[in-house]
């Protein structure tokens, strides 16, 4: 299986993460997903009253410069880690 196929498979698996997954972990996944699918951030930072979108923007900005393949690999690793933690705690 190629990296792209494995990435798509883990994108589907990410949707099965438990409700109690922390916002911090969800933001890490969001940033890696955007870097893997779009590349470097291409929008301006949302205003100070838009907390949710600003947090998402910051998460994406934090991984700026990673190659798309590297971001896919990191995303896969993070989803695996979160699924293992969820399985261990249930």
Image: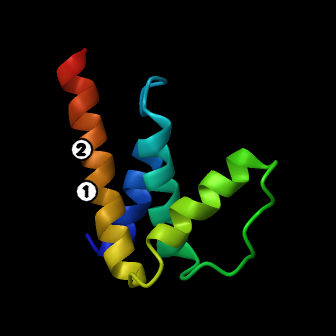
Tell me the number on the disc at residue 22. none
**Residue 41, horizontal then vertical, whole percent:** 61, 78
Q: How far is mark 2 from mark 1, CA to CA?
A: 6 Å
Give above or below for 1 relative to 86: below
Question: Is residue 38 rendered to the left or right of residue 76?
Answer: right
Q: How many numbered circles does the render carry?
A: 2
Q: Which one is nearer the viewer's eye here, 74 or 42?
A: 42
Question: Is residue 89 rendered to the left or right of residue 20?
Answer: left
Q: Quadrant of the C terminus?
A: top left
- According to the picture, the residue beneath numbered tag 1 turns out to be 77
Q: Are marks 2 and 1 in contact (CB under 8 Å)?
A: yes
**Residue 16, horizontal then vertical, whole percent:** 44, 34
Judged from the image, the secondary structure of the residue bearing numbered disc 2 is helix
Q: Which one is nearer the viewer's eye here, 35 or 48?
A: 48
Give above or below for 54 relative to 63: above
**Residue 3, horizontal then vertical, whole percent:** 31, 73
Judged from the image, the secondary structure of the residue bearing numbered disc 1 is helix
Residue drawn 39% across the image and 55% down it: 9
Q: Residues within 10 Å of mark 2 (few under 14, many from 20)?
A: few
* Quarter assignment of residue 44: bottom right
Q: Which one is nearer the viewer's eye here, 48 or 84?
A: 48
Give above or below for 25 relative to 16: below
Give above or below for 47 relative to 70: above
Residue drawn 44% across the image and 23% down it: 20
- According to the picture, the residue beneath numbered tag 2 turns out to be 81
Residue drawn 43% across the image and 85% down it: 65
């Amino acid at each position: 299986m190629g990296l792209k196929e494995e990435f798509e498979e883990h994108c589907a698996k990410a949707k099965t993460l438990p409700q109690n997954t922390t916002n911090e972990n969800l933001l890490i996944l969001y940033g890696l997903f955007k870097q893997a699918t779009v590349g470097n951030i291409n929008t301006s930072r949302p205003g100070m009253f838009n907390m949710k979108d600003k947090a998402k923007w910051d998460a994406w900005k934090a991984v700026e410069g990673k190659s798309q393949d590297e971001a896919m690999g990191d995303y896969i690793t993070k989803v695996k880690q979160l699924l293992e933690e969820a399985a261990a705690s249930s």
